[in-house]
Image (cartoon, helix red, strand yellow):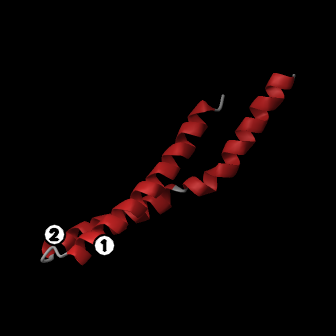
Amino acid sequence: MRKRGQEIKSAFDVWEELPKGNPSDGLDAMGQAHKALVVYAKSPRSQDDLKNLAEQMEIFAVRAKRVGKVVQQLQQVK
């Protein structure tokens, strides 16, 4: 009984984390990173251009990691 209760609690914990792993946020960040890459490719490739690209890539990476973590947690729920 105690084991089953822990499984239910774990499932609820994962569901509470789900909004933090909203895939649309990750997709939006991917789109922004892609736009930054296109702008960089067409730019004179200054330090500021590279900095902007790196910032957008970092935002995407953080959001993708967050989504991935939630997906992994969901896969572990029995």
Depth order, front residue of 10/24:
10
Q: Position of residue 13 (x, y in %)?
A: 72, 44
Residue 52 is tagged as 1
Residue 41 is tagged as 2
Which mark is first along the chain, 1 or 2?
Answer: 2
Give the residue drawn at x 77%, y 34%: 8
Judge whether residue 14 can be spotted in this image. yes
Give the residue drawn at x 62%, y 51%: 18
Please determine whether, in this image, residue 59 is positioned above or below residue 66: below
- Image-quadrant location for residue 29: bottom left
Q: Position of residue 36 (x, y in %)?
A: 28, 70
Q: Secondary structure at mark 1?
A: helix
Amino acid type, mark 1: Asn
Q: Is residue 65 left or right of residue 36?
A: right
Q: Quadrant of the C terminus?
A: top right
Disc 2 to disc 1, how far (Cα)?
12 Å
- Image-quadrant location for residue 35: bottom left
Please determine whether, in this image, residue 17 is positioned above or below residue 54: above
Q: Is residue 33 left or right of residue 73?
A: left
Q: Position of residue 20 (x, y in %)?
A: 60, 56
The reply to whether discs 2 and 1 touch (Cβ–Cβ < 8 Å) is: no
Q: How crowded is the residue under tag 1: few (<14 C-alpha within 10 Å), some, or many (20+)?
A: some
Q: Secondary structure at mark 2?
A: helix
Give the residue drawn at x 78%, y 37%: 9
Please determine whether, in this image, residue 56 is positioned above or below residue 18: below
